[in-house]
Image (tube, rainbow, N blue to C red):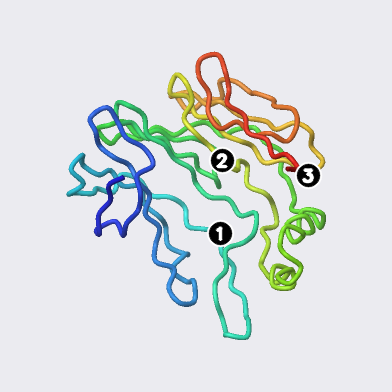
Amino acid sequence: VPTLDAIRGALPQARDAQGRFYADLFPRPGPDGSGNRDSAAVLRVDAAFTRADTIARLAPLDVAEVMGDAGRRFERRVFGGVDRWGAVADGSLWVARVYENRVDWRTPDGKWSRGQALPDRVLEVTRYDRELFIQGFPPELRGTAQQLPFAPIKPPFEAAFTGAGERVWLEKSRAPADSVRIYHVVNREGRLAREVHLRGQGRILAVSDNAALVAERTPD
């Protein structure tokens, strides 16, 4: 898998029909994490991996200033959302904006179109959410996990990928007690084309024209 020093070893996440690669580059966090307040970039890299161009900017990470034994530092908030993105064969790029809750598209010649705001309920990060998160750590690390900053609300989506027909699938956030996971399917115009419900604890990883690949954790 190719990469180069100019993009600090970032690995490509997509490739178009012309052989160009696409990768994201996040800012250097620095010793106190303050660098995470800067925006990240989506880069388009030529097939020979000799030149990288910035074609999109992503929202900065959701960070909070905290005080610890080592002094002031900036920590990423637990349950904070991030922008998601993907590229399709013709060189178009989509960016799912976590704060605006929409999907924007960029054409190969650099023109942007803004998607419509998606309908979502606002989910508060509850005490139960925090407890579940902390319980995921070994007992000796739970005290440290309790000191991490938490976002007040969950992001509108947790993950995203490009599906069949160049549609964007957004995995929506949900409450711990929810028995159904919801996906919004957004078309090239940035509009909600379909809502898909998946029962149980599984997650959709990829889709074709008539099937979905679902992963689900099991006790063993």
Q: Residue sitting at 63 percent across and 47 percent down?
A: 155
Specify the amino acid type for callout 1: Asp
Amino acid type of the residue tagged 3 in the rendering? Pro
Give me the disc on residue 124: none
Dot 1 or dot 3: first in sequence order is 1
Under circle 2, the secondary element is strand
- Residue pointed to by mark 2: 159
Q: Distance between the residues labelled 3 and 2?
A: 17 Å
Q: Position of residue 141 (x, y in %)?
A: 70, 70
Residue matched to label 3: 176
Viewer-nearest of discs 1 and 3: 3
The residue type indicated by label 2 comes to Ala
Residue 145: x, y in percent?
70, 68
Q: Which residue lies furthest to the front in this view?
A: 220
* Dot 3: element: loop
| Residue annotated with mark 1 | 62
Corner quadrant of residue 132: bottom right
